[in-house]
Image (cartoon, rainbow, N blue to C red):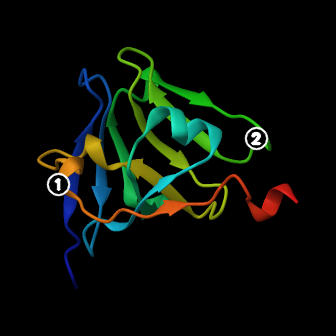
């Protein structure tokens, strides 16, 4: 049986702590140009729904939804940091804030593409 690498992630204040199972490391890092992502500026990567486990602070997480109310964006109610979201384009995945990963500096990632979510197929 292959052991999957588990990575610790936290919000800024540490009230929310979660584990990510990333067998292939950071996959599909990207930015998004939707109205929400333009404002938060995070680099996100993908993980399966089973690949994220909230270890601490589930009661501190708040949900924000807008537009089609499909995506579920979570953030820490204490420090305000966006931690993850259930994706609208692939509801079987979470997008997670790469900057929340312990030991990862998102500014060291190069050539991060930007997804065109302004013209999302679900909006037409």
Q: For mark 1, does the 10 Å Cα neighbourhood hold few (<14), some (14 to 19), or many (20 or more) residues?
A: few
- Tag 2 secondary structure: loop
| Relative height, residue 46 to residue 97 (above, below) | below
Q: Quadrant of the N terminus?
A: bottom left
The one of 76 and 115 positioned closer to us in this rendering: 115
- Kindly give the residue lying farthest to the bottom in the view shown: 1
Instruction: Residue 67 in the image: state x and y as whole percent.
Output: 78, 39
Which residue carries the number 2 mark? 69
Cβ atoms under marks 2 and 1 closer than 8 Å: no
Mark 2 vs mark 1, foreground winner is: 1
Instruction: Residue 90 in the image: state x and y as whole percent.
Output: 62, 64
Please tell me which residue is depicted at 42% across the width and 29% down the height of the picture: 58
Q: Quadrant of the C terminus?
A: bottom right
- Kindly give the residue lying farthest to the top in the view shown: 78
Please tell me which residue is depicted at 43% across the width and 39% down the height of the picture: 41
Which residue carries the number 1 mark? 108
| Relative height, residue 78 to residue 37 (above, below) | above
The one of 68 and 9 positioned closer to us in this rendering: 68
Please tell me which residue is depicted at 21% across the width and 83% down the height of the picture: 2
Instruction: Residue 86 in the image: state x and y as whole percent.
Output: 57, 50
Left or right of residue 51: residue 105: left
- CA gap between label 2 and label 1 equals 33 Å
Q: For mark 2, does the 10 Å Cα neighbourhood hold few (<14), some (14 to 19), or many (20 or more) residues?
A: few
Q: In the rendered structure, find residue 95 and report the number of the disc placed on it.
A: none
User: If you read the primary sequence from the N terminus, does the residue marked by circle 2 or circle 1 appear first?
Assistant: 2
Please tell me which residue is depicted at 52% across the width and 45% down the height of the picture: 85
Left or right of residue 32: residue 122: right
Tell me which corner region of the image, top left, top right, bottom left or bottom right, holds residue 7.
bottom left
The one of 80 and 54 positioned closer to us in this rendering: 80
């Amino acid at each position: 049986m292959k052991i999957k690498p588990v990575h610790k992630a936290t919000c800024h204040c540490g009230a929310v702590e979660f584990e990510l199972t990333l067998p292939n490391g950071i996959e599909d890092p990207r930015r998004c140009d939707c109205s929400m992502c333009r404002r938060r500026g995070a680099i996100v990567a993908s993980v399966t729904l089973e690949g994220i486990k909230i270890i601490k602070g589930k009661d501190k997480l708040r949900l924000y939804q807008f537009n089609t109310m499909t995506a579920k964006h979570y953030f820490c109610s204490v420090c305000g940091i966006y931690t993850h979201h259930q994706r609208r384009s692939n509801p079987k995945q979470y997008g997670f804030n790469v900057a929340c990963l312990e030991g990862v500096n998102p500014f060291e990632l190069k050539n991060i593409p930007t997804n065109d979510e302004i013209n999302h197929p679900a909006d037409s």
